[in-house]
Amino acid sequence: MWQACNTRAVTVNLLKFNYLYSKPNPGRVYMKVSDFIATYVEKKGVKCVFEITGGMITHLVDSFLQKTDIKIITVHHEQAAAFSADACGRVTGIPGVAMATSGPGATNLITGIGSCYFDSSPAVFITGQVNRHEQKGDRQIRQLGFQETDIVSMAQHITKKSYLVREPEEIPGILDEAFALAVEGRPGPVLIDIPMDVQRANIDVPEESAAEPEETILSDELKANLEMVSQAIRESRKPLLLVGRGVRSSFSVKELREFVALTKMPVVTSLLAVDALPFDHPQRVGFIGAYGNRWANMTLGDCDLLLVVGSRLDIRQTGADVKFFENRKIIHVDCERAEINNRVKGCVPVLADVKEFLTGFLSTFKDAEYTVPAEWNKQISELRSQWPDTNEVKANGINPNAFMHKLSRHSPRTTSYTIDVGAHQMWAAQSLELGADQLFITSAGMGAMGYALPAAIGTSFALGNKPVTAIIGDGSMQLNIQELQTVVRNGLPIKIIVMNNRSLGMIRQFQDSYFESRYQSTWWGYTAPDFEKVSIAYGIDAKTIECEDEIEDAAKWLWSEENENRPLLLQVMIDPYTNTYPKIAFGKPLTEMEPFSKPIAMEGT
């Protein structure tokens, strides 16, 4: 009897609540919260939303369907939805949007949220939560409502801000703040957790107000810093520009290329800025870091001025021996004060947004003339000739670096490369020949295997269903392989390259260095399927190649006229013992790289 009465009381309270928030009031405009959210997101320029439906987001999914022209992309794992939103935000600068239901749906987003946070990708994640009367609140219990999970507390350290909506009237203000926060300063993700009873309530629709564009005025501090940078470039005999992700996240590639043309500085890049200059740009030196091009690391080692623009100078870029890295004048431009003089000390700080810095420099010194000593450019050219990337690996069968060169020469029609995590990631960064408008998209800070296929989906949708090439290792492919169905269902022209060395090659190489070649979980106890057969089972035509002389025909097949706008999979068999070289000899300076130099300490990252 008590149960029946209690249930009736809850029902009556819910009816009262819904009446209060849906009662008409003449002269005012009311809207269901989920409808308001959907139409708001559309007004922000979002073209697609990635999701897996569940009970606590059914109102939202239905509202996006009925009230907007936004394309709803149903994937097969929430992690894939998050990675797709990550890539979409990187490409467009408009926050990518992914939704998930409460409990496992929300927690499955976490890795993708972290990827956005560490790699500066703007995104808004919307999770459904159980009704407010089903939440445990301050009760000393683990859970009250089915799938009730405190996703806000879990996500707060990997978001710019996480919100738990408590009242329907909070929604307009939270949405305004969330979308602004995702793109301002250093971009990143926000999360909004919305109880189901809030989603179905009605709210007053606030009047829209147009934001006044802010005029950019250079501060006296920045003007002085610009003068200091200009003078340092003029005085340097061996200047070098290091470009990081900040150039892409601030959408300043055009300004960067103008800056490079003006100053004539040679340019090295971090992993996330490989696409900052096209491969054939005369001032492009290469990719630096733990697995960087050997000649690029040696160039960095010998420069007397290093201008760092939008890079964190993390351990994968500098190596463990930061004293060696500091042995030159370093000017560090970053929008976050804490990133400057963090690991690498003695940097001259320039606290500024990358776009603000570049546009300020270009406007101030547009008529200036800069020269770089011919001897410095000659030295760089000689280093590149002395240490070609295709000679670093002694491969039986297909040389992965040679493959990357040949693939990219046949792929001018791809808009982007999405790269997964592992040995193939480094081969791609070392050797892909990127065109002027081609993007290089990968998970760097989080280093999440399984990233590339969902990222290719997000990128293709962001660019209007245009061709994207995903380069994936066999281990990474098995983490989100289910998204082949998303590719097929949506007819996306994604070219999937599986670099299959039948092992987890980067860690297998680590085991050679530090564990006497005990290959547990990389070669022993690990297997991979025939991805050609898997692909065909999903309805995607596929081929496998094993020899160097098959590469040309395979690349032509990928981009033939009949195949250009179709998804295809190419499985590239790589010898399991093919190492990733060059690789920094851990504990030694960045210029001392394996296999010619040996590490003096075990890698901690």
Image: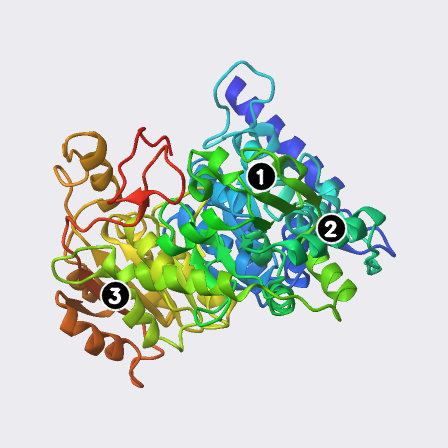
Compute the Cα span from label 3 to label 1: 39 Å
According to the image, label 2 marks what residue? Answer: 228
| Percent of width and height locating residue 121 | 55, 51
Q: Amino acid at mark 1?
A: Thr
Q: Residue at x 47, y 49 (%)?
A: 302
Residue at position x 14%, y 41% from top? 523
**Cα distance between the residues tagged 2 and 1:** 35 Å
Q: Is residue 154 above or below residue 334?
A: above
Circle on res. 258: none
- Which residue is most to the front? 375
Q: Position of residue 449 (x, y in %)?
A: 34, 46
Identity, as a three-letter code, of the amino acid under mark 2: Met
Residue beneath label 3, please? 402
What is the x, y in percent for residue 604? 36, 30
Judging by the rendered image, the residue that carries numbered circle 1 is 159
Q: Nearer the viewer, residue 446 or 195?
A: 446
Q: Coloring scheme of the render?
A: rainbow
Q: Earlier in the sequence, mark 3 or mark 1?
A: 1
